[in-house]
Image: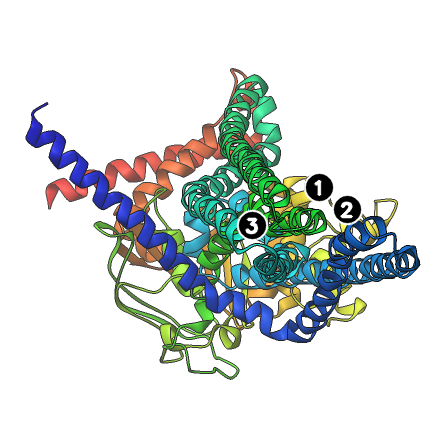
Amino acid sequence: MGHGDRRANRSRNTEASSKVKASQSERFRELWPDIKEMILPRRGIFAMGFLLMVINRVASLVLPYSTKPLIDRVIGHRQVELLAPLVGAVLGATLLQGVTSYYLTHLLSKAGQRLIAELRAKVQQHVGRLAVSYYDANKSGVLVARIMSDVEGVRNLVGTGLVDFVGGVLTAVFALVVLLRISPLMTGMTTFFVIAFSLTLNQAFAKIRPIFRERGKINAEVTGRLTESLGGVRVVKGYHAEAREAEVFAGGVQRLLNNVLKSLTAMSLMSLSATVLMGIVGAVVWFVGAHQVLAVPPKMSLGDLMTFVAFLAFLIAPVMQVVNIGTQLTEAFAGLERTREVLRERPEDRDPRRAVALGTIRGEVDFFNVGFSYEQGKQVLFDVSFRAAPGTVTALVGPSGSGKSTIISLVAAFHIPNEGVVTVDGVDLSTVRLDSYRTQLGVVLQDTFLFDGSIEENVAFARPDATHEQIMEACRIARVDEFAEAFEKGYGTIVGERGVKLSGGQRQRVSIARAILADPRILILDEATSSLDSESEALIQEGLKYLMKGRTTFVIAHRLSTIRRADQILVVEGGRLVERGTHEQLYALGGRYWDLYTRQHGLEANLFLAPGEGDTVQENGAKGEAKEAAALAEAMRLLRGNN
């Protein structure tokens, strides 16, 4: 590498260093409004804490201040009558110091814990109001760490840590005044060393702070992976991947350990520096002080020297505290930064465009030339236009990844189109207040989610104010009663995390009952019967008929036999609507829908047939339908060829 390259590298490093320093100060300035927001509501507590702290620190000065009269007058001049008042003053001050310390810790520690609880509730509430796209980009475990761990260190901003530090600085000011009165020379020398060490500490903390910030990120990643691993334990065990998961987690723990060790090394170096500082200052004070006491005539008394040494500890103590409290505050600021990043994300209902409050809707949904992409340059939908009239059923079919679920997400207002517009009753959905719209929306997803509560509680989730009779009626329509009443605790049976104690079909019935109870104007069924056997599906179809009556319904179903009665079927492929119509119209058209339907019909009719199993009437009927479909397909092919 040439000299020019080295100079260029040094220049770049200097620029990077200055940017880091600038960003550090900028971050503190950015965080100040958040800190002020936390402190102002607690100004009464802080005022009381400050008063107690002043009393505490003044009381702590009585013992060192009594050193001079004790040595010079009581011992030196045999004024024994002063001993009792001195001892009484020291005992009284010590008692006062102990009482104020107790109430100070009691008051501020509780305030710190209340702050943590408030911040956790605030962050959780905020995260819950963020758009679905935010959840797509962030792991649930990372969000858990943001809510639970990042706010933990913030208690030091209103806890004893910050107040102790401020108290230490105040005591140092008192001590400095006393030291200057005793010996300006020794005080000046001591102050020089303290200032030099403080500047060094400032540089050290500038380097340590990114370490703490990185620790929060690593901790969130490790927590996220652990949450995923525990949530997918059946998949892990199914593939005998316990050892691999343990290795991945151990790697994350090792990264966390390396980060902690790095910070501990830095802290140890600072503690070593502080100890060396104490040694140097002590040696200088003893050397200079001894010469001043032994000088002829003496420039200070022995009592003055001992008082100076005693007060010197109060001057040095804040510097020593910086090593411990400064670390806590650095960690608190790092956590507050990460918390602030989450709180700066705009909730979806805070979008200034969403100002229209809907009344009771009819449920007319229109897509006008809608285009959408999750990421720039990766278009998912292209020029999608259709109308879903109130009280009708619109089915979406097509291969996986064609865009069906994206259309449903736009109907549910989980996303906003990049092009075109989606309207409900003629109102642009991107301008509608979500609380007025989603309360009229019912969703039964393919990935059924139940909370770790009772069956009744999961059904009532849609309408917490519903009566027991209304909940039971919804359960009856969705056929939940068939299995719930067979359990020992009935509808009070706990379903476990994500409903693991129920079968897939049972979970889906509970989900359908939840949608029935919600009584929505627009209903979304995403593979609502995919986990059911044929008998259960036939029973629940009756419940779904009741649920869909008078409502605008959107259905995604890969089993095309379940959507034959839909008012319109939209065939989606490659993000475009390639066909639309009723089952009869699309089947007669002989296009993409016909191809999907006949292929699936033949597959279902012949799936898993072992030799000799085709002798039953049912199977012969299925084979006959398959042959008929194949013959029709051949006829259509010839017809298209002749044309």
Q: Amino acid at mark 2?
A: Phe
Asked if the residues shown at circle 1 and circle 2 are in contact, with their CB atoms under 8 angstroms apart, the answer is yes
Amino acid tagged 1: Leu
Disc sitting over residue 502 in the figure: 1
Q: Residues within 10 Å of mark 2 (few under 14, many from 20)?
A: few
Residue name at image x 75 percent, y 62 percent:
56
Q: Say left or right for 79 vs 595.
A: right
User: Going from the N terminus, do you reach mark 3 or mark 1 first?
Assistant: 3
Q: Is residue 108 left or right of residue 579?
A: right
373 in relation to 252, above or below: below
Q: Quadrant of the N terminus?
A: top left
Q: Which residue is mark 2?
A: 483
Residues packed near mark 1 inside 10 Å, few (<14), some (14 to 19) or many (20 plus): some
Q: Nearer the viewer, residue 235 or 110?
A: 110
Q: Residues within 10 Å of mark 3 (few under 14, many from 20)?
A: many
Kindly state the secondary structure of the residue where label 2 is placed: helix
Give the residue number, with chain letter if any, for mark 3. 150
Report the amino acid beneath label 3. Asp
Picture residue at 44% right of the left edge, 41% below the top:
204
* 464 on left or right of 162: right
Q: Position of residue 288 (x, y in %)?
A: 55, 41
